[in-house]
């Protein structure tokens, strides 16, 4: 599937409605499919995933289309790391350095 967004979609959902989650990533109405049915209207190899929320409210839906479910599980972070390895390495080094300084400072007698 294509990746329409690196990061989750925050959408308001109603428990009275049935939604069709786009699995191909080509829909203009992300994260929902434009043509709910057996097959995707733009990429027939994909089928929209039916979603009916149990409760009303804000839902965090997958934007990268790499998660195994409709909900975001953090796979976007791995995709971001694959696309931006240098920047991710800098962030990782900075985080480890700060953690090392703080933990050494707290553990020092």
Image (spheres, rainbow, N blue to C red):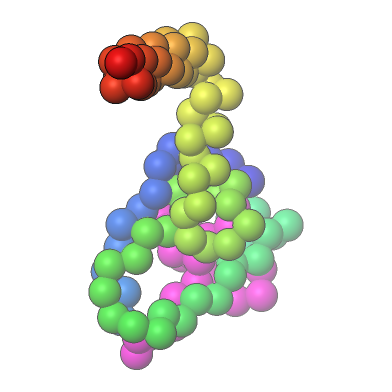
In front: 100, or 62?
100
Question: Which residue is found at the position 58% from the left and 62% from the top?
Answer: 69
- The residue most toward the bottom is 16
In front: 87, or 62?
87
Specify whether residue 43 is in view: yes
- The residue most toward the front is 109
Give the residues in magenta: 15-39
Q: Image quarter for residue 50?
A: bottom right
* Side of 49 relative to 77 (left or right): right
Q: Is 18 colored magenta in this rendering?
A: yes
Image coordinates of residue 36 in percent, x first then y, are 53, 73
* Side of 100 relative to 105 (left or right): right
**Most frequent secondary structure within the magenta stretch:** loop
Q: Is residue 83 above or below residue 8?
A: above
- Quarter of the rendering occupied by the C terminus: top left
* Side of 5 relative to 65 (left or right): left
Image coordinates of residue 67 in percent, x first then y, are 58, 52
Specify whether residue 41 is in view: no
Question: Which residue is found at the position 55% from the left and 33% from the top?
Answer: 78
Image coordinates of residue 33 in percent, x first then y, are 48, 64
Question: Which residue is found at the position 31% from the left and 57% from the top?
Answer: 10
In front: 9, or 37?
9
Q: Is residue 16 above or below residue 70?
A: below
Q: Image quarter for residue 47?
A: bottom right
Q: Is residue 28 above or below residue 37?
A: above
């Amino acid at each position: 599937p294509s990746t329409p967004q690196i990061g989750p979609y925050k959408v308001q959902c109603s428990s009275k409605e049935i939604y069709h989650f786009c699995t191909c990533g080509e829909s203009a109405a992300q994260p929902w499919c434009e043509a709910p049915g057996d097959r995707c209207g733009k990429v027939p190899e994909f089928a929209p995933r039916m979603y009916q929320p149990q409760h009303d409210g804000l839902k965090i839906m997958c934007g990268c289309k790499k998660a195994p479910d409709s909900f975001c599980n953090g796979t976007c972070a791995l995709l971001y790391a694959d696309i931006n390895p240098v920047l991710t390495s800098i962030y990782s080094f900075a985080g480890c350095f700060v953690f090392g300084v703080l933990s050494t400072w707290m553990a020092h007698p």
